Image: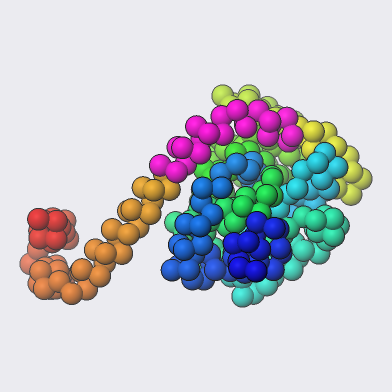
């Protein structure tokens, strides 16, 4: 059985191998995407973000179970902000998600290796593998760390931001970007002290913004709010399906631009390495005979003429 047939049949080994190809072998990844591309772009992509310790993995576990009962077949891509070689993030995730994994949820970690620009490229193609395997929805879990969560929001259909009262979250410490990207905001671990105050603050500060996101409370420990959240996610998914085609067109335009600009950057980088004009002006800058702006303009004209 070849890898494409294996993915289509939902064979887990084939899916795992395909995502490894996407991460580690650019040449083979291009061949693979070429074969499956026409049959992708139809699943709803849900992003869960928020600080480490917010309880995202346990919450995703419960939501995946609830979605299965409603007839959905979920997959999870957990973004490891360090490296897949450490195994740290995904081992923890798999333990916390074991219940839903046993019932068919597919879980995989993806390493960002500290690169922001590359995140969306590897995730986009890993999503395509899971779409081809007929998973829907596909859940992306990321740690709310700087640029990552903003970038994730650009490639998902539904963004869910998770807070909890014991991670030092307060309206003063919540980053501005986070307040603009969410469709649903969750105060998780709502059985803990401080949850009611955080919920009120999030509702007053974020709930009244132009986007009018939904603000909810959950507790995976007591199962409080889980069923309501699952129902809300299904409603939002159904609503987003109506604009999915237009959104997909916009994302493909953005992806194409990203790939072109990256290709040009790589080409120009290799041209500079062998350019005598670049070497000449670099020495002039280093000896302060010419400033970097003027040198860059002259080098650019030389390359682009």
Residue at figure coordinates x 69%, y 45% from the top left: 136
Instruction: Give the vertical position of 76 relative to 88 (above or below).
Output: above
Residue at figure coordinates x 54%, y 68% from the top left: 21
Does residue 68 appear in the picture of this structure?
Answer: yes
Query: Magenta: predominant secondary structure element?
Result: helix
The spot of residue 177 in percent (x, y) is 53, 41
Instruction: Give the vertical position of 90 relative to 116 (above or below).
Output: below
Classify the position of the N terminus by image quarter: bottom right
- Choose between 291 and 58: the one closer to the eye: 58
Extreme residue in the right direction: 222
Which stretch appears magenta?
233-253
Classify the position of the C terminus by image quarter: bottom left
Residue at figure coordinates x 51%, y 71% from the top left: 24
Q: Quadrant of residue 46?
A: top right
Residue at figure coordinates x 56%, y 34% from the top left: 244
Q: Is residue 249 left or right of residue 54?
A: left
The spot of residue 230 in percent (x, y) is 79, 38
The spot of residue 205 in percent (x, y) is 64, 30
The spot of residue 152 in percent (x, y) is 55, 48
The image shows a total of numbered marks equal to 0
Extreme residue in the left direction: 289
- Choose between 255 and 214: the one closer to the eye: 255
- Choose between 175 and 82: the one closer to the eye: 82
Does residue 223 show up magenta in the picture? no
Does residue 246 show up magenta in the picture? yes
């Amino acid at each position: 059985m070849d890898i494409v047939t294996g993915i289509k049949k939902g064979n887990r080994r084939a899916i795992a191998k395909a995502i490894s190809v996407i991460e580690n072998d650019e040449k083979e990844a291009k061949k693979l995407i070429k074969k499956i591309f026409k049959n992708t772009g139809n699943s709803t992509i849900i992003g869960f973000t928020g600080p480490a310790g917010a309880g995202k993995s346990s919450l995703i576990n419960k939501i995946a179970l609830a979605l299965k009962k409603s007839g959905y077949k979920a997959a999870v891509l957990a973004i490891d902000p360090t490296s897949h070689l450490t195994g740290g993030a995904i081992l923890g995730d798999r333990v916390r998600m074991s219940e839903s994994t046993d019932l068919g949820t597919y879980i995989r970690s993806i390493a960002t290796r500290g690169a922001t620009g590359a995140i969306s490229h590897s995730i986009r193609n890993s999503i395509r593998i899971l779409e081809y395997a007929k998973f829907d929805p596909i859940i992306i879990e990321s740690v709310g760390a700087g640029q990552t969560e903003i970038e994730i929001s650009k490639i998902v259909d539904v963004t869910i931001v998770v807070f909890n009262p014991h991670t030092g979250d307060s309206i003063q410490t919540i980053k501005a970007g986070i307040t603009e990207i969410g469709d649903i905001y969750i105060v998780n671990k709502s059985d803990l002290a401080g949850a009611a105050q955080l919920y009120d603050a999030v509702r007053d500060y974020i709930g009244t913004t132009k986007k009018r996101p939904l603000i909810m409370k959950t507790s995976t420990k007591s199962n409080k709010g889980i069923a309501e959240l699952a129902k809300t996610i299904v409603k939002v998914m159904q609503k987003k399906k109506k604009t999915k085609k237009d959104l997909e067109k916009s994302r493909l335009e953005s992806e194409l631009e990203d790939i072109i600009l990256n290709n040009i950057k790589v080409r120009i980088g290799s041209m500079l390495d062998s350019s005598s004009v670049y070497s000449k002006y670099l020495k002039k800058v280093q000896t302060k005979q010419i400033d970097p702006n003027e040198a860059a303009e002259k080098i650019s004209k030389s390359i682009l003429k």
